[in-house]
Structures are given as C-alpha cells and as structure tokens.
Amino acid sequence: MRLGALVTVLLGFLAAIPMAGGLARAQTQDQVKAPPAPAEASPATASPAAALGDPVVAAIRAKLADPTAAKDAHPGDLTALTEFYASRGGPALWVTEMGFSANGQQVLFEIEKADAWGLDPASFILPRSDALTATPQAEAEAELALDLAILKYARYARGGRFTPAKVSALF
C-alpha cells in the first residue's frame, strides 16, 4: 500500500508541473526519432545500454540495483523508483545533456522553499542546480538524487516525518 502511495505521489507531482504535457509529447517524439536496431546485431553483441534504451535511465537502473548506492534512502522510495525506472522507456525525467530541464529546475526551487511549508530545507539532499553533467553516470546520480528528494519532500509534506501514534495517543 505504501509503495503504491509513493508512486502515486510521484506521478501526481509530475502531473502538477505545468509542462507535463510537453514531456509526454517529447517522449513520443523521442520514440519516433529513435533509430531502428540493426538487423544483424545479435543479443550477445548488442551493448547493454542499447538494450536498455536511454543510457541515463540504464545508469539509474544500475544504481538502483546496487544495494549500497543509496543506503540512506527510505526503502519504500527505492522500491518505487526501481519499479518506475524498470518500466520507463523514454529519457530521464529531470536531467538533459545540458543539466536540469525546466521542470527539474522548478522542482529544485520548490524544495528549496520547503521552509515556507514548515519543513527544514536542510533535510533534503539536492543536487546543484547549476552543475552541467558530463556523463550519463553523472546525469543518473543527479536524477536519482532529485527523485529521492522529491519522494522525501512528499512524504514529509503529508506528515511522514514521524509516526503519529508514537507522538500521542490522541492521534
């Protein structure tokens, strides 16, 4: 139940971003522009990145498969992200070859204003918004850090920083 709620929150957050429709169109265009796989390539000779689609998404999948990669993250967040990126066929959500997308920048700025909602901005580990990414691995690290911050922000915003029954029997 918690996993479904986290995925719903992440997807609801994406729907709330004004340019979410543009993202869906961009994914459709990327799928149309994708070059066809060569007919002669056998599964043994094909590169793993090509078999998995976008190299950044493939790097994210690899990082999520490594149990030591995000050891400080909430287990439910990791499970939700693993399922989300396992089914993702398009590019990364928040990063581009030039850094964070406009939507990624908006999310970063919103989380930085967490104190306006009674949350401590220092609780969220955010990647630098002005850093250009050089490799798919660096892009994957930035994307994953932002994904984890979004899920943590959503959990904290709904009151998930504590267990109500442990605070008071009145809850």
Image (cartoon, rainbow, N blue to C red):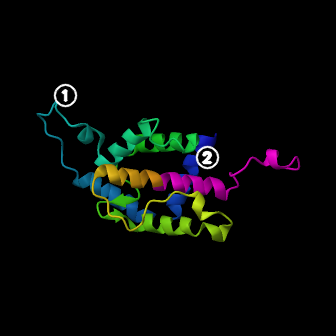
Which residue was labeled with disc 1?
A: 44
Q: Is residue 91 visible?
A: no
SS at mark 2? Answer: helix
Residue 131 % position (x, y): 36, 64
In magenta segment, residue 161:
yes
* Placement of 93 over or under 106, stated as above or below: above
Observer-side mark, 1 or 2, equals: 1
Q: CA distance from mark 1 to mark 2?
A: 39 Å
| Residue for point 59% across, 43% down | 4
Q: Give the number of the disc on residue 5.
A: 2
The one nearer the camera, 70 or 82, is: 70
Position of 145 compared to 159: left or right? left
Position of the N terminus, as image quadrant, is top right
Q: Earlier in the sequence, mark 1 or mark 2?
A: 2
Q: Residue 90: where, in percent of width, then height?
A: 34, 50
Image coordinates for residue 168, horizontal then vertical, percent: 85, 49
Above or below residue 43? Residue 159 is below
Q: Secondary structure at mark 1?
A: loop
- Type of residue at label 1? Ala
Give the percent coordinates (x, y) of residue 37. Answer: 18, 41
Farthest residue, direction top:
44
Identify the residue at image location x=51%, y=42%. Answer: 78
Instruction: Tell me where the magenta segment starts and ends, as one range.
Output: 146-171
Magenta span dominant secondary structure:
helix
Instruction: Give 68 or 3, whichever is nearer the viewer.
Output: 68
